[in-house]
């Protein structure tokens, strides 16, 4: 499912505001290039993610991730590519609250709410709650998903090289690379 | 030359204030672990650097660098180590102004002031002035140095693995790894 240009623009503006409130300064060109990932599900507010990629070389990558209130990045993993181990990433919360779920012992009462209608595509529930200044490193090829608390969140991601097109999502309906339709 | 614990503490507090003014949230443990590099020169205000290392794995590294007003990180390069190319790093200015110098055509009138008495250890003058939201990627094994403008600076550094102990400084008097004396 594609996403309308007008929806992309609105999400970019909202993400830029959240980033500014976290003290993150973007150039005008960066603001206009904020990536809006709806994952082809047509429910951006619930399952979606906004991203600014600062650098992505064959050695390292750095991004800021923005989540609207209770917005969820769906469960996925980063598999090995071309003989290299999968992407390893460190999430550092800068603003708001983020609930991160990885493989391991499940939380008895997870604080995030699994998106309605997608329950079968969320399978890992080991919970790490990150407040501003807290961080967690996700091992390569480990299933994970994350959701912002009620005020949204800004999360810095430091990682090895990103190859987003290689990500494997648990939900087979997902298209990682957005198709935008002009309106 | 060693550095006194009391001087380290004062520099940590000042660096934490600059980071806070850039919207960077640190945990209490991180504030106390801010690295104060005086480079063994005994003139921290002029030639020195304050660092917070968020993560340094065998694949990537992320730090925030703090410079006091007109404080300079002396000229150095990151050589190849164990068959890997030297460290590659991306500097992103978050607050203040930073003048970065790399190999290449020299600026006719560099905006930074070379630290007095150390002139012979500053040899590259290709100038890149970075304002908040602007960034530059330094190629591996390239000589570089940088100085903050009059209000100090906060710079995020995204890079391949850091091996600070392998850095090669132009000034042979420099000791990269600090020796702190309790006072």
Image: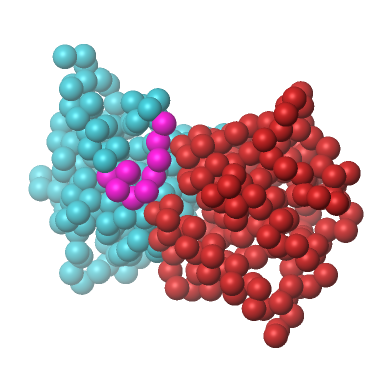
Chain colours: A red, B cyan
Q: Residue at x 51, y 37 (%)?
A: A131
Quadrant location of the C terminus of chain B in the rendered image: top left
Residue A63 makes an appearance in the image: no
Residue A128 makes an appearance in the image: yes
Residue B165 image offset from top left, x and y in percent: 40, 31
Residue B112 image offset from top left, x and y in percent: 19, 59
Asked if the stretch drawn in magenta spans residue B120, the answer is no
- Residue A22 placement, left or right of A140: left
Q: In which quarter of the view is residue B58 placed?
A: top right
Asked if the stretch drawn in magenta spans residue B25, the answer is yes
Along the viewing direction, whichever of A138 and B74 lies nearer the viewer = A138
Relative to A104, residue A21 above or below: below
Q: Residue furthest left?
A: B116
- Residue A85 placement, left or right of A15: right
Q: Residue at x 48, y 46 (%)?
A: A95
Residue A88 image offset from top left, x and y in percent: 66, 40
Along the viewing direction, whichever of A161 and A38 lies nearer the viewer = A38
- Residue A59 placement, left or right of A46: left
Q: Residue at x 80, y 62 (%)?
A: A41
Q: In which quarter of the view is residue A5 placed?
A: bottom right
Which stretch is magenta? B18-27
Along the viewing direction, whichever of A69 and A27 lies nearer the viewer = A69
Q: Main secondary structure of the magenta part?
A: loop
Residue A183 image offset from top left, x and y in percent: 70, 85
Circle count: 0
Quadrant location of the N terminus of chain B in the rendered image: top left
Q: Residue at x 29, y 37 (%)?
A: B16
Q: In which quarter of the view is residue B6 placed?
A: top left
- Residue A18 placement, left or right of A106: left
Q: Residue furthest bottom?
A: A183
């Amino acid at each position: 499912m594609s996403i309308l240009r007008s929806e992309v623009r609105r999400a970019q503006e909202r993400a830029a505001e959240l980033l500014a409130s976290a003290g993150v300064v973007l150039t005008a060109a960066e603001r206009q290039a904020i990536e809006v990932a709806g994952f082809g599900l047509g429910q951006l507010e619930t399952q979606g993610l906004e991203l600014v990629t600062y650098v992505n070389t064959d050695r390292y990558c750095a991004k800021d991730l923005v989540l609207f209130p209770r917005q969820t990045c769906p469960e996925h993993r980063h598999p090995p590519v071309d003989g290299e181990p999968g992407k390893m990433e460190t999430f550092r919360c800068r603003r708001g609250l983020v609930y991160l779920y990885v493989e391991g012992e499940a939380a008895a009462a997870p604080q995030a709410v699994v998106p309605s209608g997608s329950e079968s595509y969320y399978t890992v529930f080991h919970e790490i709650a990150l407040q501003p200044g807290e961080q967690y490193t996700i091992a390569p090829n480990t299933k994970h998903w994350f959701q912002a608390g009620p005020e949204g969140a800004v999360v810095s991601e430091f990682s090895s090289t990103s190859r987003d097109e290689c990500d494997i999502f648990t939900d087979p309906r997902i298209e990682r690379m957005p198709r935008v339709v002009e309106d």
